[in-house]
């Protein structure tokens, strides 16, 4: 662009020049500077945006001082208000009047004009070419020019800068000073002379100039600017400008990215820089010296060229005190050039040192590099890098000795340094190391300084700021030294001596019984951290805890109310230590009644050197007054007596602090004395004596009752202080005062006197009475009180105690008015006597009272609150009774403390007149309770002593002492259970399901714990309700089952007489609940000669007489009471009584039992002709040979007889028949037809043939020619040895193998044939005698190939024959090896057991029949875990019993195989047990099995979905979910053959499932033919539908709109149906009628269509929806149930297409079972996994990246690490099995934070590492360990184990290990979800394993998830139950524990 165009651009945007230089501060050079603005003009230029932003920020920086802000300079100045506000802030002046709410353009123009005129006239700033219209019209260019004028004037030209003289030379002559730009540039150049700064643009773009300027303005704030890289311009500028903003208040009017912009605007830069000359450094700024690495010192053994050894931690120190501010970086390289870990800890000490430690692992030369600087510039320190020669390891940690204060259990306090020494004299080479863990387990919070103080002693110094138990760990060569870790308790820092107290509650005298003002304060502001505690010891030794209220700022308030006379001791401690002057001795006096009152400011507070005044009013009491003042300074006391029973007391405090003012009447403190007074220091600016008060309210005789009395207070000359005004009347009552502030120091006060007489007006200022205060004023009394008189017998002599008397008060002569009369009557001890006042209506009053005791009484009478002249009056009362016939019985001389004590008083007619007062050793009085018996002559008196020692029992009758009173008794501690009595119906007999009550009396038995227990058939909660604190209690319990209960009552842990009580619990008397049942009452079962029995059940009717009579019998029936509410009745109809009629009469409580009497006819004993036969075994069609045939024999109606069944075969031999009793008179007879041909079946009953022999033909079946004997066809056998022959019958069809082996004599050998799952048969036999035998094997009745042969039996056979015989399936072949076989241990977790308390036992039955006891562990959550180490292969049976009964699922069966077995093996909990709806897991090992396919099948009560995962290591993980509880058969096959132990049996329970369900029906509807009268009630009708199959079901009836009846039903089969409608059993008209049901109307579950995402997965707290369409499925009921971890809220909605949208909302994650049926048929049963957050569940997650571990080679040392708390290495054993099957022992050693198994492999491949504790595998064992390259990786190769994945305890770390070595590199994530947030701790061992622990705050069920590369590892998530604290957990009584 040409210069001319530039000039034109400047002209266009040039700010106006000043035309009047005489009145302008802005000179020509300032105007010239404005021209800079014209240099760069373009509407879209970067500079313009920067400039506009900068000017806006500058404006807002000033406007914020008046709470104003602008968004845009272009728009927000148009109304002139913000512009005016800006000018007022800049100039500090008030602008002329302007429009505060401009709405119109003219108003806005006027406001802007006011602002511009202000600039020109008042500020002398000439504004050219900018008028108000330009601002209002939003002309941005001119607005920017105006703002620049303001910046130039107020920020650059006008301010005076420190060290700058150019500002003072500026004048009107432009040659006398520099321009503003030159002035600012000169100032910058002077500040940064080391840099060349010539402009405000390009010289600032690298950011270093800003850094230099900041450091120049505040040296040390940015000292490293010279080291900054110019290429990092933005970072440089950002750091410098942030420091300036934070610590110099230089606001970022321009942003760092704008400064480094090449198009930076010069005016913006000047605006920003103009803030620096006046910048001041804020306190606390991070001033630091310039970083100088050359001044860093490094020293210590870790940097020495020699002296270090492998495995021994070494340290060195880096000192940075003289090097300025910077960070230390240490790099350690081992001899192989690889980096190793170095721990660097900043000690924060005077020398700014760092302690660096490392543990060399290799022998050779290490390189240690130490660098110092900041994160942008790190340099080597002197001598760095260091070369350190590391020798071989040495040293013995067991020889280390640790001693000193720092390892003692107690005595360490926070913040105070302590130390201990470590002696290495006999330990050899090495360096000790110390790690201190705080109570949170943090090792960083307690810095440790370890230094060597001589050749063999190291000193460790540390201090902790955390209170609690610390763990001091001392290591030598990485091993714990003896005694490590050392537990050290760190106590809080507090100084009890600095605790102060105040308040009258701690004063030694003045406090009285029932004093409500016993308050004190504890001041801990200067005593450090601590907790104050206070307790009060009352007379007699009892302790009263005092609750302290925290008032904040270290001040606490305590209150108490004393109840006894005597010496109290207040003990106050802070931080566990007593404070200064504690304990405080407090003498509590008796309650005193006095009329003396004191009031005034001098009893509340005051000021040093100002009189403190207060008033004392004696209210007519005579006697000496005294005053005592205690405080930090001695004060003189002045007393002015006003002569009207009042006086004013003044004292002059000379020191500030706490004062106590005692006011004494007759040498005794009055009420509330001593008064606590707080005297403040002297305030020179406060002058209470200059306060002036005047007005009518202060004039002596001018008060009018109930009329305002006003006065003024003028305190304008008295300084600033609070004013307090109070008015007290003659009675000491406070009169409300209104104080209204009228101006500076002026107040208007007003009050209304309510009572006549003297008033005191007290005015105080700053807590000090003003000069004339108090003011004495009078409210005149209009009445003449001297005219009031009192007369009558009640104020005269001759009065008797307890005899009512009265007197009259006459006020008629006192004057007119309705004034109140008041009086009091007291005995000589000050106790008030009740009275009754009757207003007679004529200004007289009758008073009645009764003196309870003889003695002197005082009567006071007040009229209008004033005491009359005649008052007080004294009267003498005489005794009146003869008590010589009163006697006391049962008051023992020795009684127990805190135990209700009772005795009797005889000869008392009215117990209301009897009083008993018990006086304790401390003087406390207690009134005993008296109750009178029925005859009125004996009164029971009860009291409870609360102190030890002698007591005085004063017994008064009608106020007089009875003979012998007072009585002396001695109270001691203890108890005697023999004195406790229990009685009541609840201990004799109880009623089920009703509250039963009994009483317990502990009077006189002492104080001890009362124990109640109840044991019986049901749980019965007992409730004990105390009764009137008289030593008795009422016990109530409600049993829920009948039976005998044991109720135990103990006192002091000893049974009381009669305990335990055996209480029978019966049903309540409900006659209708009595039932009689049994064969003896069944007309079809009563037979002659057969004893008949029946039962009468009255268990629900309660006890009552029962009778039984049977007419027709000579002998009466036998009735036996079973003692459980039931009766057994038996009778015998005699032989020959067939046909006899019997009548059975049964009565209970004299009434016939329901459905009695019963009429019976005796039948013959046996009726063989009534036997019925059926079944395929006698079918005329015949039977199939080789298959069992059965016959059903029904003898129900045949009586009692012996049954016989005989089956003869075609060969004339009788076949074996098995008869099975199926109960109720039915039997099942089964035989095996092994040959073809005709069989004869004979059945006899009681010796009589039931029928003629029944012929049955056996037909052939199957293909015998396809069967082959594959093994076991023996020629010679040994007598007594079992043999097995195997027959392969594949593809032979229906049939079975039969075998007959006959001896030469024709005798048959016992043969057992078993069918195998692979279509083969095993034939087992054993001969008992030698000789020749013939074998005949058939299939389906036909001979099989080779099935007929002979063998010879001898007493011995050859060795080769023995080996052959051992090939049978039944025989186990055992091979002895040099090494013991290793078997997989059994572990059953979370087996539910009852929680009612009982004995739990477990036994394992081995295959040999031998019984062993496993280990039982109580999980404290209602479940137990079973662990068992097996010894042999085979099926084992676990019997788990509770109180002798099998628990749910018991017995459990499991198969045991060898770990090193070459055959296929399956193991895992899923093969034995599981929980419905949760994954059940097991593992199949296929190692060494060769090629073949695995097959799985599960049969049970529900379909189970199976999921298999190939782990690529020779194992397969299998998981299945069962949806219904029950027994499941799990088949595992390989190559179509069952593996060992298959099929397995797993018991699935329904534990912990929550269920919800809905039912929706669809019905077919027909109309009843014909009309039905409308008055017929549908409720009287019943309808049924008869299906073609004969099924009858009820129907639903409803009234249709046309008045007829609609009939609804669910069709279940097609065809013609008959509908019946009946009323009272009779068909109504047109009933029955026929309807036809079409096949498509019948409900068909197969046609129901179910779709939706809610069936595949779900989310918690969300609606999960699916659709059910029954449109084409006919009519039927739809039922849906969902069960899972939570009860789901189920909703459904009908859709227009006749389908249903169903949604469910689960609240807990987990697996849910959805079952859907239609028309009683199952539609689907599926398992849905629901994810998301549970209710009130918290989830914590950590994630770490796992690196691949180095490949292990043959011959190198391998290590597998784990942690097992509470176990030592000596208790563990380990072995390693190589891929070839060789097993060797492995070494176990202590490693850091756990144990390690070390072994050296000899071959490549996967090794099996077994680790055992007490012969049981530890969690996770056995482990896989690959030597060589890993075959594959992934989540399925991750292994986890430990107690923390099985169970846990609240507040205790739950620990487990995770092994990722076999999985390769990846991301490991661990989450814990449950009722509370978990704190997770993770430690990576760097060897492919890690240690994890988590701690939770709440008990409950948690889920621990372990994921690797976002996939769950096997068995994850783990369900872990965390039990409550041990003290709260339920304990299970375990019968045995494996020793």
Image (cartoon, rainbow, N blue to C red):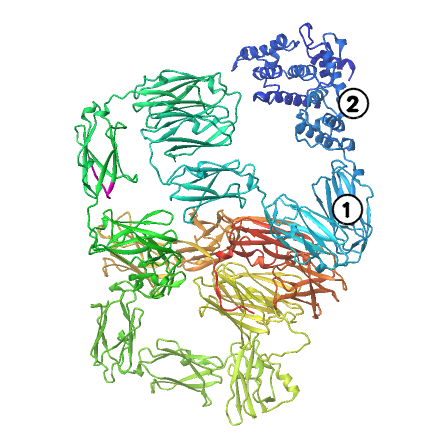
Say if residue 1503 shows up in the picture. Answer: no
Residue 852 part of the magenta-drawn span: yes
| Most foreground residue, 1061 or 1002 | 1002
Answer with the quarter of the image where residue 288 lies: top right
In the picture of the structure, the residue carrying the numbered disc 2 is 197
Residue 331 numbered tag: 1
**Local crowd size for mark 2, using a 10 Å CA cut-off: few (<14), some (14–19), many (≥20):** some
Say if residue 1184 shows up in the picture. Answer: yes
Which circle's residue, 2 or 1, is located before the other in the chain? 2
Q: Quadrant of the N terminus?
A: top right
Residue at x 53%, y 92% (from the top left corner): 1303
Q: Disc count in the image?
A: 2
Task: For marks 2 and 1, give the CA distance.
Answer: 41 Å
Q: Quadrant of the C terminus?
A: bottom right
Secondary structure at badge 1 equals strand
Q: What is the residue that sits farthest to the bottom in this orientation? A: 1305
Q: What is the residue that sits farthest to the front in this orientation? A: 624
Residue 1476 part of the magenta-drawn span: no
**Local crowd size for mark 1, using a 10 Å CA cut-off: few (<14), some (14–19), many (≥20):** some
Secondary structure at badge 2 equals loop
What span is colored magenta in the figure? Answer: 847-855
């Amino acid at each position: 662009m040409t210069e001319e165009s530039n000039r034109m651009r400047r002209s266009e945007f040039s700010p106006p020049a000043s035309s009047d230089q005489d009145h302008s501060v802005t000179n020509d050079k300032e105007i010239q500077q404005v021209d800079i603005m014209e240099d760069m003009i373009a509407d879209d230029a970067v500079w313009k945006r920067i400039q506009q932003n900068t000017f806006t920020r500058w404006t807002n920086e000033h406007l914020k001082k008046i709470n104003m802000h602008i968004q845009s300079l272009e728009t927000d100045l148009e109304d002139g208000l913000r512009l005016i506000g800006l000018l007022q802030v800049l100039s500090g002046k008030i602008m002329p009047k302007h429009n505060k709410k401009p709405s119109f353009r003219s108003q806005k123009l006027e406001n802007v004009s006011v602002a511009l005129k202000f600039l020109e006239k008042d500020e002398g700033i000439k504004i050219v070419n900018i008028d108000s219209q330009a601002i209002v019209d939003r002309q941005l260019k001119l607005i920017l020019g105006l703002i620049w004028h303001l910046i130039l004037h107020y920020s650059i030209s006008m301010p005076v800068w420190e060290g700058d003289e150019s500002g003072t030379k500026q004048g009107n002559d432009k040659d006398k000073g520099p321009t503003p730009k030159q002035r600012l540039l000169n100032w910058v150049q002077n500040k940064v002379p080391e840099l060349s700064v010539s402009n405000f643009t390009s010289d600032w773009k690298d950011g270093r100039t800003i850094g230099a300027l900041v450091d120049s303005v505040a040296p040390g704030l940015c000292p490293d600017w010279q080291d900054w890289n110019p290429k990092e311009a933005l970072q440089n500028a950002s750091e410098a400008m942030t420091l300036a903003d934070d610590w110099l208040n230089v606001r970022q009017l321009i942003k760092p990215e704008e400064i480094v912009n090449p198009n930076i605007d010069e005016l913006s830069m000047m605006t920003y820089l103009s803030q620096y000359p006046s910048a001041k450094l804020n306190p606390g700024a991070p001033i630091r010296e310039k970083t100088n690495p050359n001044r860093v010192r490094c020293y210590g053994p870790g940097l020495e060229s020699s002296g270090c050894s492998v495995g021994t931690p070494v340290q060195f120190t880096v000192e940075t005190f003289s090097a300025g501010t910077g960070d230390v970086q240490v790099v350690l390289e081992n001899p192989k050039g690889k980096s190793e870990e170095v721990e660097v800890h900043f000690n924060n000490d005077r020398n700014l040192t760092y302690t660096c430690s490392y543990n060399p692992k290799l022998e050779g030369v290490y390189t240690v590099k130490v660098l110092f600087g900041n994160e942008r510039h790190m340099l080597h320190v002197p001598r760095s890098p260091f070369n350190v020669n590391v020798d071989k390891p040495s040293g013995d940690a067991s020889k280390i000795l640790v001693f000193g204060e720092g390892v003692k259990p107690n005595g360490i306090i926070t913040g105070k340094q302590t130390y201990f020494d470590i002696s290495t004299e006999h330990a050899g080479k090495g360096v000790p190391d110390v790690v201190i863990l705080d109570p949170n387990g943090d090792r960083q919070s307690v810095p440790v300084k370890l230094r060597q103080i001589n050749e063999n002693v190291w000193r460790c110094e540390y201090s902790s700021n955390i209170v609690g138990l610390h763990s001091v760990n001392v290591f030598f060569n990485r091993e714990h030294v003896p005694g490590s870790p050392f537990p050290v308790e760190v106590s809080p820092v507090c100084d009890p001596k600095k605790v102060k107290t105040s308040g009258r509650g701690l004063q030694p005298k003045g406090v009285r019984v029932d004093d409500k003002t016993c308050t004190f304060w504890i001041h801990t502001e200067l005593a450090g951290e601590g907790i104050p505690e206070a307790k009060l010891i009352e007379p007699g030794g009892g302790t009263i805890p005092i609750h302290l209220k925290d008032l904040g700022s270290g001040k606490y308030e305590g209150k108490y109310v004393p109840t006894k006379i005597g010496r109290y001791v207040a003990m106050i401690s802070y931080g566990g230590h007593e404070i200064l002057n504690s304990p405080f001795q407090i003498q509590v006096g008796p309650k005193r009644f006095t009329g003396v009152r004191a009031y005034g400011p001098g009893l509340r507070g005051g000021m040093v050197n100002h009189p403190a005044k207060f008033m004392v009013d004696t209210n007519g009491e005579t006697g000496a007054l005294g005053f005592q003042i205690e405080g930090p300074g001695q004060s003189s006391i002045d007393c002015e007596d006003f002569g009207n029973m009042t006086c004013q007391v003044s004292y002059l405090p000379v020191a500030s602090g706490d004062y106590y003012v005692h006011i004494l009447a007759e040498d005794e403190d009055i009420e509330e004395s001593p008064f606590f007074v707080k005297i403040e220091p002297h305030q020179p600016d406060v002058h209470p004596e200059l306060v002036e008060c005047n007005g009518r309210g202060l004039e002596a005789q001018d008060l009018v009752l109930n009329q305002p009395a006003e006065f003024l207070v003028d305190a304008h000359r008295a300084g600033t202080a609070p004013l307090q005004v109070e008015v007290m009347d003659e009675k000491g009552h406070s009169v409300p005062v209104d104080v209204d502030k009228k101006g500076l120091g002026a107040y208007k006060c007003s009050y209304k006197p309510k009572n006549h007489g003297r008033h005191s007006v007290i005015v105080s200022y700053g807590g000090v009475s003003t000069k004339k205060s108090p003011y004495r004023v009078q409210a005149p009394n209009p009445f003449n009180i001297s005219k009031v008189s009192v007369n009558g017998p009640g104020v005269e002599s001759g009065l008797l105690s307890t005899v009512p008397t009265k007197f009259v008060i006459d006020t008629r002569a006192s004057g007119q008015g309705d004034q109140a009369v008041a009086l009091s009557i007291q005995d000589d001890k000050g106790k008030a006597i009740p009275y009754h006042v009757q207003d007679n209506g004529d200004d007289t009053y009758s008073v009645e009272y009764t003196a309870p005791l003889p003695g002197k009484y005082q009567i006071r009478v007040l009229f209008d609150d004033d005491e009359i002249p005649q008052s007080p009056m004294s009267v003498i009362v005489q005794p009146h009774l003869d008590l010589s016939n009163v006697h006391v019985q049962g008051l023992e001389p020795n009684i127990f403390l805190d135990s209700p004590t009772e005795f009797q008083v005889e000869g008392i007619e009215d117990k209301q007149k009897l009083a008993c007062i018990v006086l304790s050793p401390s003087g406390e009085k207690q009134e005993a309770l008296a109750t009178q018996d029925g005859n009125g002559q004996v009164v029971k008196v009860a009291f409870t002593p609360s102190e030890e020692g002698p007591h005085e029992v004063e017994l008064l009758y009608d106020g007089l002492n009875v003979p012998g009173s007072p009585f002396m008794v001695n109270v001691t501690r203890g108890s005697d259970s023999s004195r406790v009595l229990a009685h009541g119906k609840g201990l004799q007999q109880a009623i089920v399901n009703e509250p039963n009550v009994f009483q317990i009396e502990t009077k006189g038995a002492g104080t001890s714990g009362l124990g109640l227990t109840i044991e019986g058939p049901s749980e019965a909660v007992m409730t004990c309700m105390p009764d009137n604190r008289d030593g008795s209690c009422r016990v109530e319990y409600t049993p829920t089952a009948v039976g005998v209960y044991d109720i135990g009552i103990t006192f002091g842990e000893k049974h009381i007489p009669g305990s335990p009580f055996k209480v029978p619990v019966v049903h309540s008397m409900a006659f209708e609940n009595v039932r009689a049942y049994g064969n003896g009452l069944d007309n079809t079962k009563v037979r002659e000669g057969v004893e008949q029995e029946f039962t009468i059940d009255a268990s629900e009717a309660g006890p009552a007489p029962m009778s039984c009579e049977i007419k027709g019998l000579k002998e009466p029936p036998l009735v036996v009471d079973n003692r459980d509410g039931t009766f057994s009745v038996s009778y015998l109809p005699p032989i020959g009584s067939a046909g006899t009629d019997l009548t059975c009469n049964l009565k209970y409580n004299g009434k016939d039992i329901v459905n009695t009497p019963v009429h019976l006819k005796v039948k013959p004993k046996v009726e063989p002709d009534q036997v019925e036969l059926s079944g395929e075994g006698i079918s005329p069609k015949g039977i199939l040979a080789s298959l069992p045939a059965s016959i059903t024999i029904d003898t129900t109606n045949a009586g009692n007889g012996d049954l016989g069944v005989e089956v003869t075969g075609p060969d004339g031999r009788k076949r074996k028949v098995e008869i099975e009793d199926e109960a109720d008179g039915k039997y099942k007879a089964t035989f095996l037809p092994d040959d073809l041909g005709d069989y004869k079946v004979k059945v006899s009953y009681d010796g009589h043939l039931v029928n003629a022999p029944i012929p049955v033909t056996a037909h052939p079946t199957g293909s015998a020619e396809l069967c082959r004997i594959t093994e076991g066809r023996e020629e010679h056998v040994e007598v007594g040895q079992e043999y097995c022959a195997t027959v392969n019958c594949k593809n032979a069809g229906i049939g079975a193998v039969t075998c007959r082996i006959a001896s030469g004599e024709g005798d048959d050998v016992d043969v057992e044939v078993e069918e195998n799952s692979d279509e083969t048969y095993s034939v087992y036999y054993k001969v008992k005698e030698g000789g020749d035998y013939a074998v005949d094997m058939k299939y389906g009745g036909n001979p099989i190939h080779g099935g007929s042969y002979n063998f010879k039996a001898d007493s011995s056979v050859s060795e080769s024959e023995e080996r052959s015989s051992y090939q049978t399936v039944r025989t186990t072949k055992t091979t002895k090896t040099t090494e013991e076989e290793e078997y997989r241990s059994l572990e059953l977790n979370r087996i539910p057991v009852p929680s009612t308390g009982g004995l739990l036992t477990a036994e394992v039955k081995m295959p040999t029949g031998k019984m062993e006891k496993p280990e039982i562990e109580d999980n404290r959550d209602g479940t137990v875990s079973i662990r068992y180490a097996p010894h042999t292969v085979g099926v084992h049976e676990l019997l788990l019993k509770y109180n002798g009964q099998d628990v749910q699922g018991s017995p459990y069966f499991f198969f045991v195989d060898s770990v090193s077995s070459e055959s296929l093996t399956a193991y895992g909990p899923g093969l034995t047990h599981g929980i419905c709806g949760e994954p059940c897991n097991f593992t199949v090992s296929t190692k060494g099995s060769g090629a073949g396919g695995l097959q799985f099948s599960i049969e049970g009560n529900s379909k189970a979905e199976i999921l298999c995962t190939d782990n690529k290591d020779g194992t397969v993980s299998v998981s299945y979910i069962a949806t219904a509880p029950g027994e499941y058969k799990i088949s595992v096959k390989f190559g179509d053959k069952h593996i060992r132990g298959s099929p397995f049996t797993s018991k699935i329970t329904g534990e912990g499932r929550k269920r919800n369900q809905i039912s929706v029906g669809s019905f077919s509807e027909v109309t009843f033919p014909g009309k039905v009268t409308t008055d017929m009630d549908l409720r009287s009708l019943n309808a049924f539908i008869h299906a073609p199959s004969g099924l009858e079901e009820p129907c639903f009836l409803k009234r249709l709109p046309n008045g007829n009846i609609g009939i609804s039903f669910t069709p279940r089969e097609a065809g013609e149906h008959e509908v019946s409608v009946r009323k009272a059993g009779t068909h109504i008209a047109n009933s029955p009628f026929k309807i036809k049901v079409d096949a498509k109307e019948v409900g068909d579950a197969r046609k129901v269509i179910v779709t939706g995402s809610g069936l595949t997965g779900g989310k918690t707290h969300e609606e999960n929806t699916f659709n059910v369409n029954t449109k084409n499925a006919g009519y039927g009921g739809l039922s849906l149930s969902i069960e899972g971890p939570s009860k789901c809220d189920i909703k459904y909605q009908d859709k227009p297409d006749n389908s249903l949208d169903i949604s469910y909302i689960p609240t807990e994650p987990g697996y849910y079972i959805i079952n859907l049926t239609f028309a009683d048929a199952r539609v689907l049963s599926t398992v849905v996994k629901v994810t998301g957050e549970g209710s009130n569940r918290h989830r914590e997650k950590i994630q770490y990246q796992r690196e691949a571990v180095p490949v292990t080679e043959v011959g190198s040392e391998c290590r597998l690490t784990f942690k097992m708390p509470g176990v030592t290495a000596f208790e563990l054993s380990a072995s390693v099995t190589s891929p070839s099957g060789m097993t060797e022992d492995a070494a176990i050693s202590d490693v850091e934070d756990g144990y390690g198994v070390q072994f050296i492999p000899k071959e490549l491949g996967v090794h099996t590492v077994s680790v055992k504790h007490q012969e049981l595998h530890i969690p996770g064992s056995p482990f896989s360990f690959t030597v060589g390259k890993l075959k594959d990786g992934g989540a399925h190769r991750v292994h986890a184990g430990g107690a923390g994945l099985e169970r846990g305890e609240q507040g205790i770390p739950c620990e487990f290990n995770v092994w990722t070595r076999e999985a390769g590199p990846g991301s490991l994530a661990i989450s814990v979800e449950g009722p509370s947030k978990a704190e997770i701790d993770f430690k990576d061992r760097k060897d492919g394993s890690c240690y994890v622990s988590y701690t939770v705050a709440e008990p409950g069920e948690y889920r621990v998830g372990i994921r690797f590369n976002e996939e769950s590892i096997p068995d994850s998530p783990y369900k872990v139950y965390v039990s409550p604290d041990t003290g709260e957990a339920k304990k299970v009584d375990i019968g045995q524990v494996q020793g």
